[in-house]
Amino acid sequence: MAFLSYLINGLSLGSVYAIIALGYTMVYGIAKMLNFAHGDIMMVGAYVAFFALNSFGLPVIPSVLLAMLACTVLGVVIERLAYRPLRQAPSLAVLITAIGVSYFLQNGAQLLWSSSTKVFPSVVPAGSVQLFGGQLSISYLTIVTILICIAVMICLTLFINRTRTGKAMRACAEDKGAAVLMGINVDRIISITFAIGSGIAAIAAVLLCSTYPSLSPTLGSMPGIKAFTAAVFGGIGSIPGAFLGGLLLGVIEILSKAYISTQLSDAIVFAVLIIVLLIKPTGLLGRKISEKV
Amino acid sequence: MLKVENLVVRYGMIEAIKGISFEVNDGEIVTLIGANGAGKTTTMHAISGLIKPVSGSIWLNDTELTKIPGHKIVSMGLAQVPEGRRVFAQQTVEENLTLGAYARKDKEKIKADMDYVYDLFPRLKERHAQLAGTLSGGEQQMLAMGRALMADPNIILLDEPSMGLSPLLVSEIFAIIEEINNKGKTVLLVEQNAKRALAIADHAYVLETGRITLEGTGEQLASDERVQKAYLGG
Ligand SMILES: Nc1ncnc2c1ncn2[C@@H]1O[C@H](COP(=O)(O)OP(=O)(O)OP(=O)(O)O)[C@@H](O)[C@H]1O
Ligand SMILES: [Mg+2]
C-alpha cells in the first residue's frame, strides 16, 4: 500500500514536470532551440499567482489566469527581443542567450521581490480521499494536479492536431521553408508556441508551489532542469513524449527517494536518462523518419 | 507575368546568382536548365521569398516580390513545388493538401480544388489518410504538386519534379505539367532532364554558374549545338 501511495505521489510530481516539459518540447520542436529560461518564466508565474492570491486577495481561478497571462506575455516578449534576432545564428549563441535570459529573470525577481523565501498558499483545499479503509490516502491536491495535467495534455493534443494553427505548427516543426511556401507566417507560429508553452508553465508553477510552498527567485531552476530531462527522456520535440517522460521522471524520483536514497534520487533520475539515451538516442517516443527520395 | 531583373543572390561570400534576368509570360511553360550547382534552386528560392537577394528585383505583375515577406507570396498567386518534394512527412496526404490551401479563405472552392487534385492524382485519393512520409518517391512528387495546386496559383514553379523517378513516372509527371498548363496555369520549370523540359517549353534559359548563357524557344535550344553537347548527351 505504501508503494501505491508513492506511485501516486510520483505521478503527481511527474504531472508538474510533464506540464513544464510540454513547453520545453513544443518550443524545441518548432523553434529548434532549448529555452533554458523556461523554468524561470514559470518562476515569474509563481510570483504573479502569489501576489494575486495574497496581496490582491483574488480567488484561485482569476489568480491562475493572471499568472498564465503574465507568463504568456513574458514568453512572447522574450522570444521577440532575445531569440528572434538570433534566428539565423549558430545554436550555441542561442543557447548562451537562453542561459543569459534565465539569469536575467532570476536576478530581476531578486531585485523586485527580494531573495527571501515566501510561503505560497495552496490553491487546493487541504484534505484527502481515503481508500482501502484508510490505508491509502490521496490528497485533493494530488488528484487535482494529475487531473489538470491530463486536461492540459488533451487540450494541447486537440489543438495541435485539429486546428489550423496547430497544423501550421506541425508543418513548421518539420520544415520551415516548406511552411513558408504554404503561406505560413513562421515568426507568428513561433510566437504562438512560446505563448502557449509559457502560459501552461504558469499552471505548473501554481501546482508545484502548492505542493512545495516555498517561493524564491531560483525556484524554477531545478524543476526546469528536471522538465528538460523529462522532455529529452520522452524524445525532445514529441508532445506525448514530454507527457510520458514527465510522469516517469516523477515516479522514478519519488520511488528512489522512498526506497533507495533521498540524496541519490537526482543522480538516479539522470542515470536512468543516460541509459535510455544509450539504448534509444531519440528518447522513448522520439522518432526519426528516414526521408525517401 | 513574372519578371526577374538583374538578380544577385549570395550565400555568405559565395555569389550563387550573378545578375540574371528573365521573364515568364502568362500561359507559357518556361524552363530553366543547368548543371548541378548552376543556381537553379537558388533562383526558385529567391522568387518564393525563401532567400533575400542582394540586389535586383522580381516582379509578379505589379507586385515586387522582393519587397514582401515570403509567406505572403503564395497568396499573390505563385506556388512552388520545391526540390526534393519537401512534403510534411508526419502529416497525412489530406493534411498536406489542406496546408497547400493554408493562405486561402474560399472554403467552397478549396473543396472543389481538392477534388480536382484527387482527379489528377487518383493515387493520392486512395492514400488520403496515409502519412506522407510513407509514400513512395513518385507519390510524394504527386503530393507536392497537388499541394502547390491547392494554393490555386496562376503560376506554378517546379524544381526538378522528375528527380529520381522511373522513366514511366517521369512521362506521367510531364504529361501532368502540360495538362496543368493547358488549364491556364503558367509554369516555370527547373530541370536537369533537359530533353524533356525543352520538348514542352515555350521558352528556355540555360543557367551556368549563376549566369544565363543562352536563351531561346524550347525548339531552338534543343537543336543548339552547345546545349546538345552539354545537356543532351551529344
Ligand atoms: N544554403 C547554402 N549555403 C551556401 N551555399 C549554397 C547554399 N545553397 C546553395 N549554395 C551554393 O549555391 C550554388 C547554387 O546552388 P543551387 O542549389 O541553386 O544549384 P542548383 O542549380 O539547384 O543545383 P542542383 O541541380 O544540384 O539542384 C552552389 O554552388 C551551392 O553550393
Ligand atoms: Mg537545385
Image (tube, coloured by chain):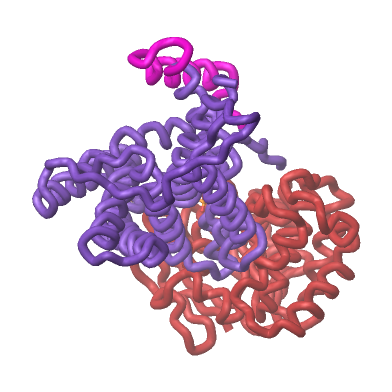
Residue A8 at x, y percent in the picture: 55, 31
Q: Is residue A266 within the magenta segment? A: yes
Relative to the observer, which residue lies in front, A61 or B104? Answer: A61
Relative to the observer, which residue lies in front, A196 or A286? Answer: A196
Q: Which chain is red?
A: B
Relative to the observer, which residue lies in front, A133 or A244? Answer: A133
Q: Residue at x 86, y 55 (%)?
A: B127
* Horizontal side, residue B24 vs residue A217: left or right: right
Q: Which residues are magenta?
A: A257-284
Looking at the image, is A1 positioned above or below residue B86?
above
Q: State whether residue A282 appears in this view.
A: no
Question: Which quadrant would residue A63 be assigned to in this image?
Answer: bottom left
* Horizontal side, residue B135 vs residue A36: left or right: right
Q: Residue furthest top?
A: A260
Q: State whether residue A205 appears in this view.
A: yes
Residue A269 at x, y percent in the picture: 44, 20
Residue B119 at x, y percent in the picture: 89, 70
Q: Residue furthest bottom?
A: B62
Question: Which quadrant would residue A68 be assigned to in this image?
Answer: bottom left
Looking at the image, is A59 positioned above or below residue A4?
below
Relative to the observer, which residue lies in front, A243 or B148? Answer: A243
Q: Is residue A260 within the magenta segment? A: yes
Q: Residue at x 51, y 40 (%)?
A: A128
Quarter of the N terminus of chain B within the rendering: bottom right
Report which colour depicts chain A.
purple
* Horizontal side, residue A221 vs residue B176: left or right: left
Residue A44 at x, y percent in the picture: 26, 52
Q: Residue at x 56, y 81 (%)?
A: B76
Q: Residue at x 32, y 41 (%)?
A: A36
Magenta span main SS: helix
